[in-house]
Amino acid sequence: MKQDGKVRGGRPWSFDRDAAIDTAMLLFWRHGYEGVPIGDLTKAIGVAPPSLYAAFGSKAGLYRRAVERYEEIRGILDAAAIRSAPSLPEAVRVLLTGAVTAVTQRQHERGCMISSGLVACHPDHAGLARDAAARREALRGRIVQALSPFAQGDRLEKLARHLAAVMQGISIQARDGVAPSELHDIVEEVAAGIAARSPQD
């Protein structure tokens, strides 16, 4: 639905704002923030730069909305499935299998937009990099919550940090073109290691 009636800075939005966010999300996911010039964004969305700035304030503003959209549709852990697993190793397997699926579903947008995003960037984009780091830390917090039926305290915190690092590595390898079958091998190695250290689970 087009949102022609809304106005920012005296200019009406003459395009579908949600579709613009979806288009930007795919471009940023595929090429990274610094790899998408504003001209490529406006061409793909089909608007002039003033209209884009009127709707989102800046390229950075559009990027933030694109990351939020990514989290809404791709970055959600299946906490219920994780928590219903019969053991900690199985819960870890569910978590990491979901991560592999998320980063390999699309042919041209591989990896995780958040795990791989803005790990290194120009100093002018430090604010966006801090936001990306905060989102990665929030993901670690969600891992803690999802695995809380299986571990507690310092053990849970360390495990969540370890798994967040594994997920980030899986994301980068997916971007490098590693086959899903090989990424699933990583999942099995991690789950086996957890099982070996948790014979009581």
Image: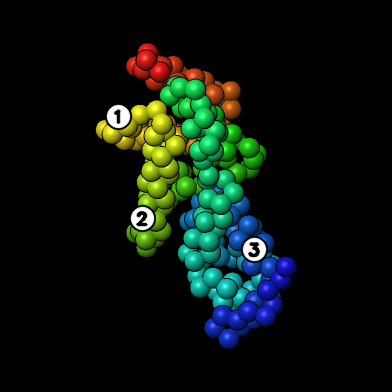
The answer to whether 64 is drawn above or below residue 2 in the figure is above
Residue under the image location 64 percent in, 40 percent down: 106
Q: Earlier in the sequence, mark 2 or mark 1?
A: 2
- The dot on residue 18 is 3
Amino acid type at mark 3: Asp
Q: CA distance from mark 3 to mark 1?
A: 41 Å
The answer to whether 27 is drawn above or below residue 195 in the figure is below
Quadrant in the picture for residue 36:
bottom right
Name the residue tied to disc 1: 155
| Quarter placement of the C terminus | top left
Horizontal and vertical percent position of residue 188: 49, 19
Q: Secondary structure at mark 3?
A: helix
Q: Secondary structure at mark 2?
A: helix
Q: Residues within 10 Å of mark 2 (few under 14, many from 20)?
A: few
Name the residue tied to disc 2: 130
The answer to whether 154 is drawn above or below residue 90 in the figure is below
Residue under the image location 36 percent in, 55 percent down: 130
The answer to whether one can see residue 119 in this image is no
Residue under the image location 57 percent in, 38 percent down: 102
Whether residue 166 sits left or right of residue 76 in the image: it is: left
